[in-house]
Image (tube, helix red, strand yellow):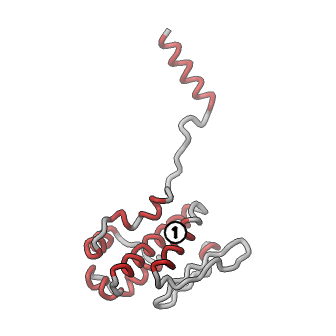
Amino acid sequence: MNQLWENAFYPEDIVYLTNINNKGLPMHKRTNTTIEEVNQSIQELSLQWNVSEQDNLRIATCLIGLQLRKLRLMRGKTQSRVAKAVNVTFQQIQKYERGQNAISLNIAKKLCEYLDVSIDYFIKPMEDKNLTFLKRREANVYPFKKRFVENQANQSHE
């Protein structure tokens, strides 16, 4: 398993995202039982974006799960109640909230309908911080190519 995530620990109703810093010490531990704690976890996870593509996928899964947990807490719903509404087990909801399992699109749609939000709610932290999976290439990476194209355009107008 990747060094960054090697000490992830998931007890039953507690979420610990213990990411390892350069000294090998846990950077944070929190239960994520309040909306404020969830928001802090979202903030800290988003700062770890772009370590690697694999880590970005894990971070995205965790961010989406934390958004689910925050929304569930805001709506005052239990994991069991949400699970029953979308036809999964409460253990599956726990795994979504912890970032252990990714939420499929059809389950995400059911969650949105039940919790009365749009689908983009789950990726809002990534959108707000402009966290992207694909790297954009500079328009003209090679200066000589730009000059060549400009010269060709000028010659065709003469």
Can you give x and y, in whole percent of width and height, for residue 48 in the image? 59, 66
Q: Position of residue 67 (x, y in %)?
A: 42, 73
Q: Which secondary structure lies at badge 1? A: helix
Number of marks in the rendered image: 1
- Taking the image as shown, residue 157 lies to the left or right of residue 93, namely right
Residue 1, image quadrant: bottom right
Displayed quadrant of residue 75:
bottom left
79 with respect to 66 (left or right):
left
Q: Is 156 situated above or below 37?
A: above
Which residue is located at x 27 percent, y 79 percent?
Answer: 86
Q: Residue at x 58, y 60 (%)?
A: 50
Residue 84 shown left or right of residue 123 in the figure: left
Foreground of the two, 123 or 89: 123
**Is 131 situated above or below 81?**
above
**Mark 1 neighbour class, 10 Å CA radius: few under 14, some 14 to 19, many 20 or more:** many
Read off the residue under disc 1.
Answer: 59
**Where 141 falls versus 96 (above or below)?**
above
In terms of depth relative to the viewer, which is nearer, 135 or 130?
130
Residue at position x 50%, y 53% from top?
Answer: 134
Q: Amino acid at mark 1?
A: Ile
Q: Position of residue 26 (x, y in %)?
A: 65, 80
Kindly identify the residue that appears in the image at 54 percent across and 24 percent down: 149
Extreme top residue here? 158
Q: Position of residue 71 (x, y in %)?
A: 37, 76
Residue farthest to the bottom, as pictured: 12
